[in-house]
Image (cartoon, rainbow, N blue to C red):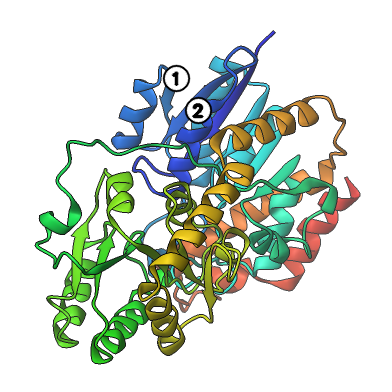
Amino acid sequence: MKSKVLYVSHSGAIAGAETCLLTLLDYLDRDRFEPVVTVPWNGLLREKIEGRGVKLHLANAEWWIRPESAFGRGRMNIAGCVDEIRRVIEIERPAIVHTNSSVVLSGALAAREAGIPHIWHVHEMLVGHPGLASLFPLPLIYWMMNALSDRIVTVSDAARRPLASGVDLERLVTIHNGVAMTRPSSERIPLHRELSLPPDAIVIATIGRLGPEKGYDNLLRAASRAKERGARVCFVIVGGGLPVETASLTRKIESLSLKGSVHYLGERDDVSYVLESIDLLVVPSLTESFCLAAVEAMAMRRPVVATDCGGPSEIVVDGETGLIVPVNDSERLCDAIIELASNKRRRKEMGEKGFNRYVEKFRAEIYALEFEALYDEVLHSMTRRSDADREIAFFLTSVYQNLNDCRGGGAASPEGPSPLRRLLSPRRWARRIGNLLRS
């Protein structure tokens, strides 16, 4: 008998987490597991899912982990999102709910309400993340995730370590993301010709959305140093971003006199073609829980230079499949780029070793098999569940929503203390949580 798995997506667009979800849908054993997906809005992800013959529902997803500037802009309605997921659960009767990001809470709450096993798939490293924030301290976030999940899956050991202090270790597991092996169309124009690059130019790419955590400023400084040192290298940047982010990147390229050396290609749907055309991939990130682009480059036999920012250090073997350099050190990044750009033989050797490592550890088939084994384990295990933990988690959710709402208009009034002060009253917390624990 098939087991139905309900996947809760935090986005209707396609970025790293959504790419991993699509890979799982492609390689999941459909004779044993039936996938159903919720997405919060109509977008490219919906088209991709429906094109795979997978049933889909629309259900809003309120982000509880979000950019700092987004808190307080409007009332937070996690409870309403839980109701929408509950309706889907009532229709589909899944055996497992799988939430595909740490930034949404509603899937976990809905599964706990329905008494269904829940898996939280954490793609993000929240500690020190420049683009994501929480209204609660992270240990309390981790406690809530633990209280609402049967298993918490991290995409790397680097992402796992911060959670280990607040999550039961028997519930915490690492499953590295997997990448399908693809080949670009032979009909495409070579990238050198597309960009009018010199025939002998060494082409170096970085791939990822434009965000503060991706370290593009560091890459541009390294590119500027490489130009000063006379290296015959060209850089291409592939990744979408907000208009303000693309405008900022363009200004920085011009201010460093890199207009002929650095080419911003925007968002592309032909990453395999780009990787086939380059000599080297660079990952200049400040923080990275994994790095799909690094694995994709290895699958195309391309070496990788990456910063020691988390997940990439588990993908790239320093000195064998590429080079690892310190975070935000443009001089060391430039040295590594020039070292490999000037040594074709070493690039080829690293590319071959990288391909072998990809085949051994990061294929999509391995990724799907590990999740299938995890689903079997969860379905056949008796996870200890605490009703008190559940009640506290639901209460803390209401506190979280009120904290956000108070940011948007919780000023004190002559009639008494502000809503925020009343909410955070130690007596209120002690009374409510004490009653919950006694019950």
Check residue 128 in the rendering and tell me which mark sits there, or answer none: none
Q: What's the amino acid at mark 2?
A: Leu
Q: Which residue is mark 2?
A: 25
Q: Can I make out residue 311 in this image?
A: yes
Residue 429: x percent and y percent?
A: 74, 64
Residue 282: x percent and y percent?
A: 40, 68
Whether residue 57 is situated above or below residue 265 in the rendered picture: above
Horizontal arrangement in the rendering, residue 236 relative to residue 126 (left or right): left
Name which quarter of the figure residue 366 lies in. Answer: top right
> What kind of element bears circle 2?
helix
Whether residue 391 is situated above or below residue 377 in the rendered picture: below
Q: Residue furthest top?
A: 1
- Mark 1 touches mark 2? (CB < 8 Å): yes
Q: Residue furthest front?
A: 345
Horizontal arrangement in the rendering, residue 288 relative to residue 171 (left or right): left
Quarter of the figure that contains the C terminus = top right
Q: Name the foreground residue: 309 vs 424.
A: 309
Q: Which residue is mark 1?
A: 54
Q: What's the amino acid at mark 1?
A: Val
Q: Residue at x 49, y 57 (%)?
A: 291
Nearer mark to the viewer, of 1 and 2 = 2
C-alpha separation, residue under disc 1 versus residue under disc 2: 8 Å
Q: Name the foreground residue: 306 vs 166.
A: 306
Residue 109: x percent and y percent?
A: 63, 40
Quarter of the figure that contains the N terminus = top right
Q: Residue at x 24, y 53 (%)?
A: 267
Residue 337: x percent and y percent?
A: 39, 76
